[in-house]
Image (cartoon, helix red, strand yellow):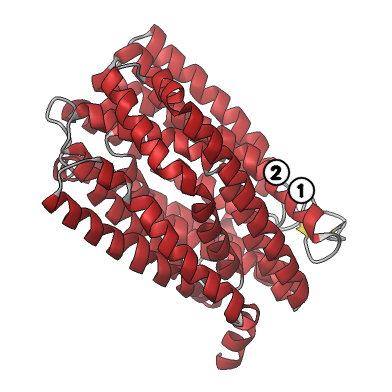
């Protein structure tokens, strides 16, 4: 492996040289660790609120995790497009285009963060009522999510900064910043909720402060004189040609994320109709399941960057070699975690809330989905390869058709005829099976490695 040769370079990793296996592992491991802390970051609110404020407050925090995903997913999806553009031009050695993409991406983060702040604060009550949140829980849920969205700008900017560094091959520095902000978040949660007893809103406020701290650290690094692609605030603008590429590669991911987020909101509204115990169980299980998703996320980000850089350098066989290794690694790790979770589900759920009904429903959900984590990993990994190859429309089409349309048709139909919550949980493995079959056929029988070249010829 080699780092870009430049007197001012700092941790920009060229993934077009050296062992693909070592490069992917070296890149994925810091991302995996950073995602562990990210999940702790998100889980701290749930755990501390459940311990100090009780089941009703826990239900308020857990009631609408999918609402947050829905609100931010479109902009995060478009940011994925920026990462694809940056990694591609970095692999091709086109330094000026890399700089333009970074400045365009940062401005996009600022604009989207401000929009999310205003929109989230104004419309949180409307969304929560639409999602059938228990009336006993509703006031605290509104309070929590309104404070959470006050930090939307910091949330958007951190994801943008992390995506820029990852696209350049630097997955370690975001890890260091996230460790700091995660520890800060836990300490503030304990102080605000445990000591001051400020209520459920203070958990969201702690998250806002922690996210803002991580953004300050990220921007401080990106603006350093010895950073290879130093950021200048006076250069922040939408470079038309670069913006067009970012939208081309990112819009499908943004649309995909938004529609899946909407589908999950509808699905959660069905869960919410079973009452606050089901809400607490569903939200708690989702937090724990997030840990099972960590190896998938780590290898996915590594795959997108690796494939993007190597296809930008026209090293097709190398891109395929790395893709196979990354997919297999994510599948094996995810299923090993799934086995452990299946066995330990009641004990893990009980850490957050030991109410018997919460534990029963949470364990039921976990044991319905955990045996199929390898399929979830496979679908996401092939989707990551497609995005790195500039084929973002493919995962968008599969996810919309299967994880959104089919999942909603199934849930709405089954709840009409059989009012049992376990059938809602079954929606996940059913749709994972279908999407995995489609991705398997596409990955093995399509010419995904030449996507960039065909787009260049059309242009």
**Furthest-bottom residue in view?**
458
Task: Work out whether residue 266 can be spotted.
Answer: yes
Residue shown at 27%/35% (left/top)?
Answer: 63
**Furthest-top residue in view?**
195
Q: Is residue 71 above or below residue 255?
A: above
Q: Nearer the viewer, residue 15 or 435?
A: 435
The reply to whether discs 1 and 2 touch (Cβ–Cβ < 8 Å) is yes
Query: Where the C terminus falls, by quadrant?
Result: bottom right
**Residue 280: image x %, image y %?**
29, 28
Q: Nearer the viewer, residue 246 or 434?
A: 434
The crowd level at tag 2 (other Cα within 10 Å; few <14, some 14-19, many 20+) is some
Q: Is residue 133 above or below residue 353?
A: below
Q: Which residue is mark 2?
A: 29
Left or right of 123, for residue 301: right
Left or right of 305, for residue 137: left
**Residue 6: image x %, image y %?**
86, 59
**Residue 282: image x %, image y %?**
32, 35
Under tag 1, what secondary structure?
A: helix
Picture quadrant where residue 294 is located: top right
Task: Work out whether residue 94 can be spotted.
Answer: no
The crowd level at tag 1 (other Cα within 10 Å; few <14, some 14-19, many 20+) is some
Q: Which residue is mark 1?
A: 26
Residue shown at 66%/71% (left/top)?
Answer: 97
Residue shown at 73%/63% (left/top)?
Answer: 322
Query: Where the N terminus falls, by quadrant?
Result: bottom right
Under tag 2, what secondary structure?
A: helix
Which numbered marker is on residue 276?
A: none
Picture quadrant where residue 352 is located: top left
Whole-Å distance between the Cαs marked 1 and 2?
6 Å
**Residue 124: image x %, image y %?**
22, 41
């Amino acid at each position: 492996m080699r780092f870009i040769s430049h007197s001012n370079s700092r941790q920009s990793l060229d993934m077009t040289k050296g062992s693909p296996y070592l490069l992917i592992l070296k890149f994925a491991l810091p991302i995996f660790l950073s995602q562990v802390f990210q999940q702790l970051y998100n889980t701290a609110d749930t755990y501390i609120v459940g311990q100090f404020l009780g089941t009703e407050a826990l239900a308020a925090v857990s009631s609408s995790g999918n609402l947050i995903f829905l609100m931010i997913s479109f902009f995060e999806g478009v940011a994925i497009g920026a990462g694809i553009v940056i990694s591609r031009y970095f692999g091709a050695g086109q330094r000026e285009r890399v700089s333009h993409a970074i400045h365009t991406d940062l401005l996009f983060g600022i604009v989207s963060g401000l929009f999310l702040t205003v929109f989230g604060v104004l419309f949180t009550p409307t969304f929560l009522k639409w999602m059938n949140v228990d009336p006993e829980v509703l006031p605290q849920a509104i309070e929590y999510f309104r404070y959470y969205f006050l930090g939307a700008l910091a949330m958007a900017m951190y994801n943008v900064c992390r995506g820029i560094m990852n696209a350049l091959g630097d997955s370690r520095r975001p890890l260091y910043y996230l460790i700091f902000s995660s520890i800060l978040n836990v300490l503030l949660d304990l102080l605000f909720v445990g000591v001051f007893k400020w209520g459920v809103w203070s958990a969201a406020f702690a998250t806002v402060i922690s996210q803002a701290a991580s953004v300050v650290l990220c921007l401080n690094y990106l603006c350093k004189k010895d950073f290879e692609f130093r950021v200048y605030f006076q250069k922040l603008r939408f470079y038309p040609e670069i913006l067009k590429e970012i939208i081309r590669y990112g819009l499908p991911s943004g649309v995909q994320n938004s529609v899946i987020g909407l589908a999950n909101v509808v699905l959660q509204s069905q869960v919410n109709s079973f009452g606050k115990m089901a809400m607490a169980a569903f939200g708690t299980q989702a937090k724990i399941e997030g840990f099972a998703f960590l190896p998938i996320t780590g290898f996915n980000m590594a795959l997108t960057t690796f494939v993007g850089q190597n296809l930008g350098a026209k090293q097709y066989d190398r891109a395929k070699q790395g893709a196979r290794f990354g997919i297999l690694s994510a599948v094996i790790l995810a299923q090993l975690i799934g086995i452990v979770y299946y066995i330990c589900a009641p004990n893990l759920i009980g850490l957050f809330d030991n109410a018997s009904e919460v534990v029963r429903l949470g364990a039921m959900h976990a044991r319905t989905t955990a045996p199929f984590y390898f399929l979830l990993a496979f679908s996401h990994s092939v989707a990551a390869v497609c995005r790195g190859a500039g084929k973002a429309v493919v995962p968008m089409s599969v996810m919309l058709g299967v994880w959104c349309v089919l999942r909603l048709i199934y849930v709405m139909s089954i709840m009409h005829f059989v009012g049992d919550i376990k059938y809602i949980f079954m929606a996940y493995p059913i749709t994972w099976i279908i999407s995995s079959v489609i991705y398997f056929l596409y990955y093995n029988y399509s010419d995904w490695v030449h996507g960039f070249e065909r787009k260049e010829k059309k242009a």
